[in-house]
Image (tube, rainbow, N blue to C red):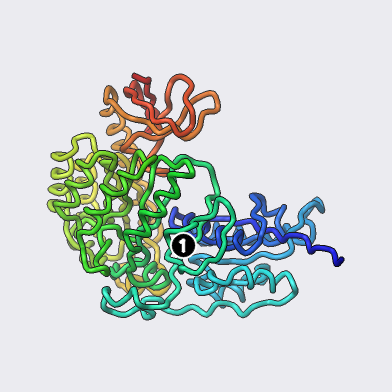
Amino acid sequence: MPATAPQRSVALVTLGCVRNEVDSSELAGRLESAGWLLVDDAADADVAVVNTCGFVEAAKKDSVDALLEASDLKEGGADGTSRTQAVVAVGCMAERYGTELAESLPEADAVLGFDSYADLSSHLGKILDGERPASHVPRDRRTLLPISPTARHDSAVVTPGHGDANHGDLPDGVAPASGPPVVRRRLDGRPWAPLKLASGCDRRCTFCAIPAFRGSYLSRRPADVLAEARWLAAQGVREIFLVSENSTSYGKDLGDIRLLETLLPELAAVEGVERVRVSYLQPAEVRPGLLETMAQTPGVAAYFDLSFQHSAPAVLRRMRRFGGTADFLALLDRVRALAPAAGIRSNVIVGFPGETEADLEELTGFLEAARMDVVGVFGYSDEDGTEAAGFDGKLDDEEVAARLGHVTALVEELNHQRAEERVGEHVVVLVEEDDGAAVGRAEHQGPDVDGVTQLTGVHAVGQLVPAVVTETEGVDLVASPR
């Protein structure tokens, strides 16, 4: 009898946002269902698959560093103990730069785009057998789907997170036995999980390259989202974190722009799910009905991740965005009228081409009046292929850095003040770790980027603990169970 070939192994290294985490869980599900052994450490894997981020320069550098680090493991690594034979780049940076990345980084054995995801197992097998597949050739993915949003669901274009219905038999722990067409394997044991609501974006912000490599907007069907939520709940997930490039557009390509208002109560009613959180809301698209649903539906977090980016109307118009200080403050007033303790976060860009001292002053005045829980501050830099890269009125690097430092310092103080305002509030904390001190998140705190709440006492991971805030440590809170 011929000897059985040893099972080939793969490690997924994920960089960037939670949307990439969802994509990695899909790749993990596809590979495991194709017979691959999933391992945590790249040094223990035959192939290291690096799911790259291509959003901003710092993220791209981190992706290149991760690829180089994985490549160093080949041929046994420095201590001779690594089994890594190949390194493969996938994800946003691979999709965005493709052949250019491959030429500049020969240490990667392959650079594969989104179109390769459905057949990634075959590609990895061929690479281990000594073949080197052609590198992905980048293209503007906005051109692949019909212009009309309602015609997009008939397209055969590969969209990460949307999958196909033809799986065959799947291993235990891989979704789904039936239900959503996306194959998925959880890669961690956290009590919360991201769930992809939609992919792509139809907006044309002048500073953003994401639509060009993520494509046009495509909603997942509600039945698929609900089925995946049920599967996640069966895996022990207590909080569902809905992710997309623009959640407020959900349903427009399915013929119902108010579909999210219908879906949220259904998700909150899934057995085992205690909290549903929505990410990335476009202020110009926020509807009164959506505000009411998010603020008043039991089980839906009163959490508003609002993408303001700036508040000076002149800067926003150059960004090809809408609104301004007065509009944004009015929106925040409506949120707090419905849910006084709501969590509110945003991101802003400083030093955008043409930004004047008066524009910067308007932004800082807005931030002082807005009283948001967390604000991410980014200094403008040109992104390949964006309209803003060709704008006049560019500020020099030193001025951008100075403005970035000024606004960052202001935001840190404002966010600390907002945290102090929460002392005495009653919160419910989802425990995420307990290594002698329980740490988790209250309803107003999103995963990874909004601070945490430390609880006194010992509590099990996954438990939701009613507590009262007693003190602060920056944006982090300390609370005592009640």
Q: Nearer the viewer, residue 109 or 174?
A: 174
- Read off the residue under disc 1: 182
**Residue 326, image x, y percentages:** 12, 51
Can residue 407 be spotted in the picture? no
Image quarter of residue 398: bottom left
Q: Left or right? Give the position of 99 relative to 302.
A: right
Q: Residue furthest right?
A: 1
In the rendered view, tell whether residue 240 sits above or below residue 179. Answer: above
**Residue 413, image x, y percentages:** 32, 36
For the point 27% across and 61% down, the residue is 250
Image quarter of residue 428: top left
For the point 32% across and 48% down, the residue is 267
In the rendered view, tell whether residue 360 sits above or below residue 5. Answer: above
Task: Please give the count of numbered marks on the rendered protein.
Answer: 1
Q: Quadrant where the N terminus lies?
A: bottom right
**Residue 449, image x, y percentages:** 40, 44
**Residue 112, image x, y percentages:** 57, 72
For the point 33% across and 24% down, the residue is 469
Q: Nearer the viewer, residue 305 or 179?
A: 179
Q: Left or right? Give the position of 17 relative to 278.
A: right
Q: Quadrant where the C terminus lies?
A: top left
Q: Left or right? Give the position of 439 relative to 338.
A: right
In the rendered view, tell whether residue 192 sits above or below residue 349. Answer: above
The amino acid type, in three-letter code, at marker 1 is Val
For the point 44% across and 53% down, the residue is 18
